Amino acid sequence: MRHQICAAITLFLPSVAAIAQDLTTCAAIEDDAARLRCYDTLSHRSEHAPRKNPSAAELGHRWEQHLLADAARETFSLQPYQPSYALITHLQSFNYAPYHATDPQDQLSPTEIKFSFSLQSKMVDNLFGNDGDLWISYTQISYWQLFNTQYSSPFRETDYNPEARLAFVTDIRLPGLTLRAIDVGLRHDSNGQSGSLSRSWNRVFADFELMHDDLVIGIRPWVRVFSIDDNPDIEDYYGNFDLRASWEKNRNLFAATLRNPFSHHYGVQLSWSFPLAGRLRALAQWDYGYAENLIDYNHRNNRIGLGLLLSDWL
């Protein structure tokens, strides 16, 4: 019996030594993703564990963590979609024309509150095997004449945007970038007004998100559907696609949106958010050009705003 035990130990020790050497090799790898893959290989996890997407820990970058966290969420739970914020803004050139058509005595102020809130919920998980989630979302942006007390501080404009989309997580390598997400959906935009103030339209869109480290670039083309005659020329100002870019460094987030590129009816929005205390963040925003909102889609705005970012993915 003693000889059998000794023989077993003799056979077992080299295996233990080999495993210890392999673990030491893995531990010496500095890159988090590569080190995790090394451990997974040793445990044979990659051969047996189902993987819808790489884990957030494996990827490490904030944008991908946000993307994968959404893909892993349970259905029928609410969470933020687009950034929600409240800003005190000032317009250099106010668009009085739509309101004078209905009430020539109407007096509006170029200083107003702009606020937005946005929510989403996953309705169906994995429609196509291990990918393809169905989401619905609702975004609302309002322009409130809070300081115009002489005229009862009215809400000048509110744009409503319900949306349904199919979201796919991808891993397509391109030169210098990775295509990490493709969304396809239907979007409705309306300001809920009637008569000469009514603005609305519908779009079928695709959204491509490309990432590299702390940079994310979005390209969103669309096609107008179910045309309404309230604003037949709206495509001349919104165009057929927009471009977005966001970059995060030391918890400072810089974002840019270019509407209707390559046209003299272009619009651009630049924003910078930074931490104040804990999760409370400040937001500075500049919007110039056309199509900032529905009521001003054919007017060239120049708006500067400063306020608080209420929810975001950072």
Image: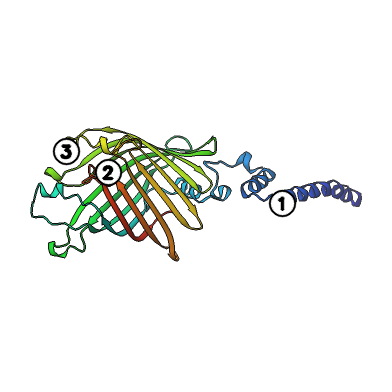
Side of 174 where 74 appears, left or right: left
**Which numbered marker is on residue 297?**
none
Mark with earlier residue (3, 1) = 1
Q: Nearer the viewer, residue 72 or 297?
A: 297
Crowd band around label 1 with a 10 angstrom C-alpha radius: few (<14), some (14–19), many (20+)? few
Label 3 amino acid?
Asp
In front: label 2 or label 3: 2
Label 2 amino acid?
Ala
Structural distance between the alpha carbons of marks 2 and 1 = 53 Å
Q: Which residue is mark 1?
A: 28
Q: Which residue is mark 3?
A: 230
Circle 1: element type = loop
Quadrant location of the C terminus?
Answer: bottom left
Crowd band around label 2 with a 10 angstrom C-alpha radius: few (<14), some (14–19), many (20+)? many
In front: label 2 or label 1: 2
Q: Are marks 2 and 1 in contact (CB under 8 Å)?
A: no
Image point (46%, 38%), residue name: 131
Circle 2: element type = loop
Which percent across, then down, holds residue 11?
85, 46
Circle 3: element type = loop
Structural distance between the alpha carbons of marks 3 and 1 = 65 Å
Side of 42 where 170 appears, left or right: left
Structural distance between the alpha carbons of marks 2 and 3 = 15 Å
Q: What colour scheme does the image use?
A: rainbow
Q: Are marks 3 and 1 in contact (CB under 8 Å)?
A: no
Crowd band around label 3 with a 10 angstrom C-alpha radius: few (<14), some (14–19), many (20+)? some
**Which numbered marker is on residue 291?**
2
Which percent across, then down, holds residue 154?
17, 58
Image point (25%, 43%), residue name: 189
In front: label 3 or label 1: 3
Side of 5 where 300 appears, left or right: left
